[in-house]
Amino acid sequence: MTEQQASIRQKLASYLAQLPQPAVLKLASGLERERLRGNSGLPYDMILSGLRPLLASFKGKRPGMPDALRQFCRPFEDLLVDEDEDGVRQGRISRASVMRVWSWLEDELMPDALPDLKKRIADHTLKGDEIALEAAVSVMHASVAAAIRAAISSARQDSSKRSQAEKRLGGESGFEDACEIASVLAVAPAMLRLQAALPKHIDDFDDAMVATMKEIYEEVEETAPEEALYLPFAAMGRLKEPSQILRFVRKVAHQRNDKVISRCELAVFGEQLLSDMESIAHSAETLRPGHTDLDALLEDVRRFAHLSRGFTAEIDLRRNGEWGQRLLAARARLSAAISQEMSRFETELVRALPFHQFGQYGRGGPMRPDLAKAPDGARIEKVKACLRFVNGVMPICEPLGAQSHCRSIRQQIETYLASYEDRLLEELRVATGTARGNAEEFVEASARLHEALGEDRQAEILRRRGQVAARG
């Protein structure tokens, strides 16, 4: 892709992201219909590639007339991720790999057979012949799986072929994504059956859903045990709380004990949850205090807390067991990183709402708010981010083992704010000229800091006190 094409794609994606859901659905359906009819002249792939992430985020069944490419993707659509920061991992397929694999099939692996299959799928779709369409799609899935697996097997035996395949597929990760796609398509009927049985977005993975998945899983496991794992991976992609996949693991293992579960064939799901938590802890450890995107860190901390709570709620962890030790270690590392980050918050607050000393007593003299300058906007915004972090972490600090430090930091912040505001209002009553204007701005800045702490009522009270003080 040229630099100009990349720029066009980026601009197009930005424009499409602004469209309301009905417009996105209508546009996608129209494009798919016209492409099935063979109408050329539009960059279908470019536009649809920009729509796919939006369509994936929508709830409910997606309308439209799926073409061969969309039918190709259906069995593994729950495994697609925009990017996998942790590298290649079973059960995750990069969206960027889809078109590379599809082009590989069109150009090299199935140049004769795939066009015929695409035409059959388009014809049956336009005619509304569901039975014939299902048969054609099933043939395509099986044929594509066989073709990719044959090419992968050959590439693994010949370094030059592997190098060519990796170059074609975007590197080693793309090569592994192709392997994943082939494995999923090998059990495509079961994957589609599971999709039909489960809601697109699952808030609570209840007993009925678990039983349904167990039934389908065990049928596939008898003939394709390795590929059967993709069924729970797909279900996991639909869960609001990924840790609930452990309910299925328990059902199959007939145990809640982590010692038994960690040694069964489904231990990979516990390992993945632990790996996600360890990755969050590692990322937090590498951050430089004072140079961190605190809003992004807060989202990671919340995700860790949800995973941790879910993990411990779904299975019985032993503190001296391998999984228990790993979870405790990850919590300790994240707690230390949070504590280190928060240890500078009071200093940032002092810089944003500064005092100065007056009189003849040196450092022991009285303190007044420094009103020589208006509030520094950048410093106020920095402190607001700090306080949003404190407010966000407080409800989840206990499972992280950081409750003592969080409470201490919040108390220090509240004590400083109370002292500063009392003296600021005293100064506002007597200040004149520039100092008075600055004092009023500091009152508003302090109110916004209370709002960042989730203290809207205190913010409003401070504004009213400021109005009274300004009247003298």
Image (cartoon, rainbow, N blue to C red):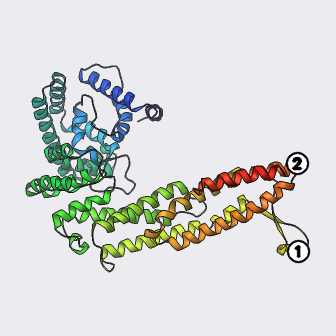
> Which is more toward the observer, 100 or 77?
77
Sequence-first tag of 1 and 2: 1
Residue where numbered disc 1 is placed: 361
State the residue lying farthest toward the right.
360
Q: Amino acid at mark 1?
A: Tyr
In front: 172, or 270? 270
CA distance for labels 1 and 2: 27 Å
399 relative to 360 in the view: left or right = left
At which x and y percent is residue 458?
Answer: 64, 56
Dot 2, crowdedness within 10 Å: few (<14), some or many (≥20)?
few
Element under disc 1 = loop
Q: Amino acid at mark 2?
A: Gly
Name which residue lies at 60% across and 53% down: 456
Residue at figure coordinates x 12%, y 26% from the top left: 129
**Looking at the image, is 57 positioned above or below residue 315?**
above
Asked which quadrant contains residue 90, the reply is: bottom left
Label number found at residue 115: none
Q: Is residue 337 left or right of residue 69?
A: right
Residue 301, image x, y percentages = 46, 61
Q: Nearer the viewer, mark 1 or mark 2?
A: 2
Q: Residues within 10 Å of mark 1 (few under 14, many from 20)?
A: few
Q: Residue at x 60, y 56 (%)?
A: 455
User: Which quadrant of the structure image shows residue 354?
Assistant: bottom right
Q: Where the N terminus falls, by quadrant? A: top left
* Residue 433, numbered circle: 2
The reply to whether residue 74 is visible in this rendering is yes
Nearer to us in this view, 407 or 120: 407
- From where the camera sits, is residue 376 visible? no
